[in-house]
Each structure stands twice: as C-alpha cells, then as structure tokens.
C-alpha cells in the first residue's frame, strides 16, 4: 500500500476535536516554556486549564511580527536552547530578520506536511523534481527538498536563476516537476518556447510559491510548456516555511493543513471573523510546533474565506489564493486597493496577456493619477487594441471604483524576473 501523508479524519467534527486537544497542549506548552507567552497569557487571564472549547481560542492574545523582532534572536522560544537544531529567517528586506527556531520534531513535522503537498499535487517516487527556489537561511529551497526526499522523489536542487542550467537539466535529466516563483515560471516558459525545447523535455507540473499568480499568467505558462497542471503552495517562515497548504487538481481554493494549525480569517480593523466569501487577514495558531509556537499570529496575508468543502472530497478545509498583504494596500484617491485585485480583474478580460504594471504619480495639479501598463496577447492586431483598452478601463472603474489611464504594450515588453516581479510603482510624494 502506498504511504499517504493525509490525515485520517472522516469529517470536520473529528478534525475540530483534534484541534481542541492540540490547542490545549499548545497553551500548556507555551505557558510552561516561554516567559514571553506566560506573561501575555496571564495578562489575558488565561491559564493552562482555561481552554475547554474551541470558543476559548478568542480569549488568547494576538502575536505580531513586532513580537518576533523584539524577541531577537530567539523570539517565542518555548523549549531550552539545547533542543534547538536549526534556525531559519524571514526574507524581509529592512532591519533585523525574523529568526525562527526548530526542534528536530519541528523539522520532521515540516517534512511530513510538505510531503503532503507533493502528494496532493500527484507527485510520486517516480518523479524528478527540479527545485528552482532560494537556498540558504531562507526556508524555501530546503523545505522543497525535505518534502521531495520524504515522498521519495528525486530532488534536483538547482536553486533560482541560471536559466541556461535550468533548461539543460530539464532536457538532460528529464525533470517532470519544477518548483519556482510564478515569475520565474513565466520566464522559463518563454525561454523554453524561444529555444524550441517543448518537445524535448518531460515537464508535467509546476508548483508555484512565494508570490501571487494570476489566471492569465498560468494559462500562458501552461500553453507554452504543455503542462498537465500547476499548483499554488503556501507557507511562511513563522509557520514552518513553505508547505502549509496547496490547491488540489480541482483548483477551488487552497487546502490548508488544519490538523497542524488553526486558521482564523479576520477583518484587519475589527479583528472579527469575516463572512463566507469575504476577504480578511490570516491569523494562525500552531498545534504541534515546539520551539517557536504561534498564538493567534497576525500574518498580514489577505485571503478569501471559503466555507464550502472541496469537490475533491478531501476533508481538509479551503481558503482563497493569497491576494496580498494588508500592509501592501494602495490608497488611491481615497479608495483602498490590494495588488491581488489587479490579477483577478485582468485575468477575466479576453485579449490580455500575463504581465502588467501599476504606475502611481502625483502631477502638477496636485492630483493622483494611475497608469495601468498591460501586455496584449501575442499577435493582437492594432484594430482590437482600442477596444481592449476600453474594456480594461471600464473594468477598473467598475471593480476597483477608480479611473486609470491604460497603456497597452506588446507581449514580452514588460520585465521578466527570476524571483518575484515588482508590479506596483508608487512615485507619489510620501
């Protein structure tokens, strides 16, 4: 019998019972092991025996990124330092990094849930997985490799960039899966098309992490490379790393590993739960982490709440694709806009290719202006560009409730990236 990394819960009731028992364990663990958490819990009036039902989760205090920074270099540590076997750091670009500690069991749990991602994507020991994400202090490369080796597939740890080597290994080693950012996926797809390698490689699947990917981008990548499927993987350093959720082949949302962490989707302002279908901030509470557990950690990541089960039949619940971060919000003429809204909107318009840029400027009249640079599909005739420009402008007005100038450019004119693409450029006076 083939090993499975999926939980054996038969229904949500069994899953919720499991969550409550693990939540009780987590509260006892941090109360006894972490001076930081003990002080926070006592201030909130919570003791180890206070958790009796799932509703008691609301009694627990929130944790933020500032708490991690203030606790540098070992924030939230809930075990003796002698039990720490590894650290990883966030990929933030300002100030000191957020460092997270791991026990050996934390590493084994991370390996298990990452293997679950590969299993959900249909990866088997017969696959060859080309890992084209960053290695080092970050969680990306080592996470993808741990899960790959746990499920028994062949790991090819190329790392990011180096397109010549990526193409050579795709052809010579006949990689069947590649793991990368969506931006690098697009770059690779266009390069493989340019080099006419499509018929010489065995690539079947792509797993995207670290940034959003719109439907238009995914369609172009799939067409250029002849892929069977593509998947979005989620995760962050604070919560093990990548590998904490994946969309299955039905692509109805991201399955998240609710047996390893509790997810709340809350209004960023009121901190109350949002309704089904609404967008809110992901707040996570870990259920197994030993070294640096999270208690109601505000991730700042924004997702749509999905209460319905997936048609694939898996009991693990769903949330929507990550739309952006609450601290990445654009305020334009009094309207709050999240970068992910541009992905969603442009993906619905026929004739649009996969790349775009949002340019914000304050001109001499003192008013703010938005220019949306959008790539057309390859070979679009000039006669259709006027109509396409109008469709984009109308969609922005209707869906985002602002006006913008539309600048259509040919497919391939906007920059490509080997890592993450920058798409919003705010040149207004701060």
Image (cartoon, rainbow, N blue to C red):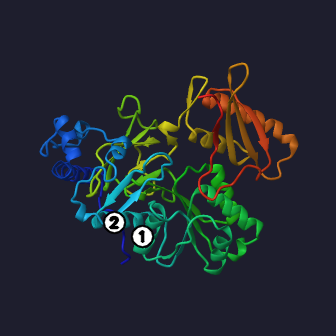
User: Residue at 56% of width from left, 49% of height from top?
Assistant: 212
Marks 1 and 2 in Cβ contact (< 8 Å): yes
Q: Which percent across, then down, holds residue 204?
A: 60, 69
The residue labelled by disc 1 is: 146
Q: Residues within 10 Å of mark 1 (few under 14, many from 20)?
A: some
x 74%, y 65%: residue: 193
Asked if residue 379 lies left or right of residue 149, the reply is right
Structural distance between the alpha carbons of marks 1 and 2: 9 Å
Residue 225: x %, y % from top left: 68, 65
Give residue 218's quadrant in the image: bottom right
Secondary structure at badge 1 equals: helix
When the figure is inspected, residue 44 is found, relative to residue 193, above or below; the finding is: above
Asked if one can make out residue 188 in the rendered structure from this viewpoint, the answer is yes
Mark 2 lies on residue: 107
Q: Quadrant of residue 113?
A: bottom left
Residue 376 vertical placement versus 367 (above, below): below
First of labels 1, 2 by sequence position = 2
The residue at 71%/67% (across/down) is 192
352 vs 430, nearest the viewer: 430
| Quarter of the rendering occupied by the C terminus | top right
Q: Residues within 10 Å of mark 2 (few under 14, many from 20)?
A: some
> Relative to 13, is 181 on the left or the right?
right
Q: Is residue 110 left or right of residue 376?
A: left
- What residue sits 40% from the left and 50% below the top? 98
- Left or right of 375, for residue 54: left
Give the residue at the far top of this rendering: 365
């Amino acid at each position: 019998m083939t090993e499975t990394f999926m939980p054996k819960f038969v229904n949500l009731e069994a899953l919720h019972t499991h969550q409550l028992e693990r939540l009780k364990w987590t509260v006892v663990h941090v109360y006894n092991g972490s001076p930081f958490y003990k002080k926070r819990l006592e201030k909130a009036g919570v003791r180890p025996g206070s958790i009796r039902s799932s509703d008691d989760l609301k009694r627990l205090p929130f944790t933020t990124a500032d708490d991690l920074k203030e606790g540098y270099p070992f924030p939230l540590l809930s075990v003796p330092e002698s039990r720490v076997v590894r650290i990883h750091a966030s990929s933030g670009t300002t100030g000191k990094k957020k460092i997270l500690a791991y026990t050996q069991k934390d590493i084994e749990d991370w390996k298990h849930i990452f293997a679950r991602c590969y299993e959900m994507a249909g990866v088997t020991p017969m696959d060859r997985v080309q890992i084209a994400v960053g290695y080092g202090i970050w969680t990306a490369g080592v996470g993808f490799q741990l899960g790959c080796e746990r499920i028994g597939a062949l790991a090819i740890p190329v790392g990011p960039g180096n397109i010549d080597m990526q193409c050579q290994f795709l052809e010579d080693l006949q990689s069947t899966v590649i793991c990368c950012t969506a931006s690098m996926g697009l770059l690779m797809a266009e390069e493989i098309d340019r080099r006419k390698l499509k018929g010489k490689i065995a690539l079947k699947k792509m797993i995207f992490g670290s940034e959003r990917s719109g439907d238009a981008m995914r369609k172009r990548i799939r067409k250029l490379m002849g892929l069977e499927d593509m998947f979005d993987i989620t995760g962050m350093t604070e919560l093990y790393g990548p590998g904490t959720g994946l969309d299955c082949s039905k692509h109805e949302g991201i399955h998240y590993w609710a047996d390893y962490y509790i997810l709340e989707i809350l209004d960023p302002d009121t901190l109350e739960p949002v309704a089904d279908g609404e967008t809110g901030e992901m707040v996570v509470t870990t259920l197994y982490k030993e070294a640096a557990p999270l208690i109601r950690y505000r991730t700042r990541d924004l997702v749509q709440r999905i209460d319905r089960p997936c048609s694939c039949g898996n009991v693990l619940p769903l949330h929507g694709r990550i739309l952006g971060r609450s601290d990445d919000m654009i305020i334009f003429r009094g309207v709050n806009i999240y970068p992910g809204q541009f992905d969603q909107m442009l993906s619905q318009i026929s004739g649009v290719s996969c790349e775009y840029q949002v340019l914000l400027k304050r001109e001499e009249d003192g008013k703010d202006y938005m220019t949306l640079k959008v790539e057309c599909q390859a070979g679009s005739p000039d006669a259709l560009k006027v109509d396409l420009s109008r469709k984009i402008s109308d969609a922005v007005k209707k869906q985002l409730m602002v006006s913008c100038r539309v600048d259509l450019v040919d497919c391939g004119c906007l920059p490509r990236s080997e890592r993450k693409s920058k798409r919003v450029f705010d040149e207004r006076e701060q």
